């Protein structure tokens, strides 16, 4: 009888922890759209330039951080008007593009795991919870299905891992830098993150503007060579 009671208590504790993860309060420290789109599901088969590579083993992970001003500047005015991330009043900076499973030996991007399984549309609570680091419902949905499904069992596993890695980084004030270059941006990251090896970060520029920063991790979520 006593052992059964202990088992019930443990089960209730486990359920409480799980519910806490899924029902975390909405992050309100950044602008949120008044209403999400009703349809933002992702279907790689409808994308002419997409492909599926589900049978490749994941050897490492790459956290891709996108510089919003450069991304938004690459869009037409009509496209920018449709992107909540790009509205001038929202002022998003370095956001998460995605967390990408990587193969150990890849000669091209098509050698990495990609579009491993179809998943249902994420619910609104999930989208809003992670909106500040990934400001777009379609961005979250597509990154989860395109990359997350190739290593993570659930969307919660994927996004909480992304959140953990993202929040563990000290992000330099890139806007305050005068004429930033790949070298000065990388040096700033290394200075603010003493445990980050130089070999674990890549800074990608587009002309003279920051485009993306990639941070590489092993499957143990420790820094790894890119």
Image (cartoon, rainbow, N blue to C red):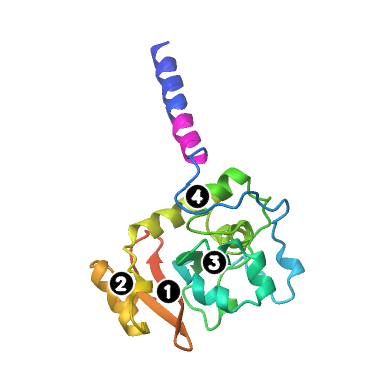
Q: Residues within 10 Å of mark 2 (few under 14, many from 20)?
A: many
Question: Image height check: is 195 above or below 203?
Answer: above
**Residue at 56 percent of width and 63 percent of height:** 85
Q: Is residue 225 visible?
A: no
Residue named by callout 1: 213
> Looking at the image, is mark 1 or mark 4 earlier in the sequence?
4
Nearer the observer, disc 3 or disc 2?
A: 3
Task: Identify the magenta region.
Answer: 14-22
SS at badge 2: helix
Residue named by callout 2: 189
Q: Say whether marks 3 and 2 touch (CB < 8 Å).
A: no
Q: Which quadrant of the figure contains the N terminus?
A: top left
Horizontal relation, residue 63 to residue 223: left or right: right
Q: Residues within 10 Å of mark 4 (few under 14, many from 20)?
A: few
Q: Which mark is drawn over residue 88?
A: 3
Q: Say whether marks 2 and 1 touch (CB < 8 Å).
A: yes
* Residue 104 on image: x %, y %: 46, 74
Front-lying residue, 12 or 1: 12
CA gap, disc 2 to disc 4? 26 Å
């Amino acid at each position: 009888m006593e052992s059964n009671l202990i088992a019930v208590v443990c089960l209730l504790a486990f359920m409480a922890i799980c519910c806490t993860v899924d029902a975390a309060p909405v992050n309100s420290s950044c602008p949120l759209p008044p209403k999400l789109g009703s349809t933002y599901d992702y279907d790689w088969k409808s994308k002419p330039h997409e492909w599926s590579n589900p049978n490749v083993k994941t050897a490492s992970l790459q956290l891709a951080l996108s510089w919003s001003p450069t991304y938004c500047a690459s869009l037409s005015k009509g496209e920018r008007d449709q992107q909540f991330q790009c509205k001038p009043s929202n002022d998003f900076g370095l956001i998460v593009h995605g967390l990408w499973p990587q193969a150990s030996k890849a000669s091209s991007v098509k050698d990495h795991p990609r579009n491993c399984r179809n998943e249902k549309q994420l619910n609104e609570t999930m989208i809003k919870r992670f909106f500040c680091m990934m400001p777009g419902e379609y961005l979250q949905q597509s990154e989860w299905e395109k990359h997350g499904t190739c290593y993570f069992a659930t969307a919660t596993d994927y996004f909480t891992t992304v959140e953990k890695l993202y929040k563990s980084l000290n992000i330099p004030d890139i806007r305050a830098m005068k004429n930033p270059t790949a070298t000065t941006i990388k040096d700033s990251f290394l200075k603010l993150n003493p445990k980050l090896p130089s070999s674990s970060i890549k800074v990608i520029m587009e002309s003279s503007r920051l485009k993306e920063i990639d941070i590489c991790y092993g499957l143990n979520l420790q820094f790894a060579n890119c």
